[in-house]
Image: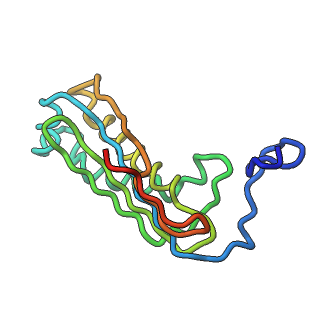
């Protein structure tokens, strides 16, 4: 069990001690998509939902979620993020969300980027569910990370 970073010698859960790690610039980019009916997608693109501007609200929700990731995911470190941006692109069949999260610190921001995307897409669902309850959230994944001991990584295109 000693090879598992989130377990101590007895097998109990623990938060990893990152105190001795060097502070480096770290960035993570995640993406995801919500697929929906053409009617719902058109309403979102044209700002016709009764609940308001879906894209603006989802962007704020995703940014707020990134800042609260350690409250949601056990054993995540609370981080002082220096950047959270969230792009939401509506099209004829849904909305694609891409989050970029950054900081200078001792641990990565992958979970924050993934959380931002997921909560943004859940917000789209919540705001548009009156038009389409069959919406499907999927393809949530990390596409890039930079910094830290393990270095840079980028997902293969495809």
User: Residue, x 60% and y 46% (percent of image)?
Assistant: 73
Q: How is the image coloured?
A: rainbow
Residue 9 horizontal/vertical position (percent): 88, 48
User: Residue, x 17% and y 38% (percent of image)?
Assistant: 49
User: Residue, x 26% and y 53% (percent of image)?
Assistant: 56
Q: Quadrant of the C terminus?
A: top left
Q: Quadrant of the N terminus?
A: top right
The residue furthest top is 134
Specify whether 63 is left or right of 45.
Answer: right
Which of the 4 quarters of the picture holds residue 64?
bottom left
Specify whether 57 is left or right of 22.
Answer: left
User: Residue, x 47% and y 60% (percent of image)?
Assistant: 153
Residue 38 sits above or below residue 155 on the image: above
Residue 38 horizontal/vertical position (percent): 13, 30
Residue 130 horizontal/vertical position (percent): 24, 27
Task: Tell which of 140 and 127 is nearer to you.
Answer: 140
Residue 89 horizontal/vertical position (percent): 21, 50
The residue furthest right is 10
Specify whether 126 is left or right of 76.
Answer: left
Specify whether 20 is left or right of 134.
Answer: right
């Amino acid at each position: 069990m000693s090879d598992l970073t989130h377990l101590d010698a007895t097998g109990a859960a623990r938060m990893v001690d990152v105190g001795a790690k060097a502070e480096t610039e770290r960035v993570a980019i995640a993406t995801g998509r919500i697929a929906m009916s053409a009617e719902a997608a058109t309403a979102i693109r044209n700002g016709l939902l009764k609940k308001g501007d879906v894209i603006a609200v989802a962007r704020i929700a995703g940014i707020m979620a990134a800042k609260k990731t350690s409250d949601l995911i056990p054993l995540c470190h609370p981080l002082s993020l220096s950047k959270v941006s969230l792009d939401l692109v509506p099209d004829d069949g849904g909305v694609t969300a891409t989050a970029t999260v950054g900081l200078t610190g001792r641990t990565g921001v992958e979970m924050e980027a993934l959380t931002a995307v997921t909560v943004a897409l859940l917000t789209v669902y919540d705001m548009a569910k009156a038009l389409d309850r069959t919406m499907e959230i999927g393809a949530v994944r990390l596409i890039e990370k930079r910094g830290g001991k393990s270095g840079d990584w980028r997902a293969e295109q495809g």
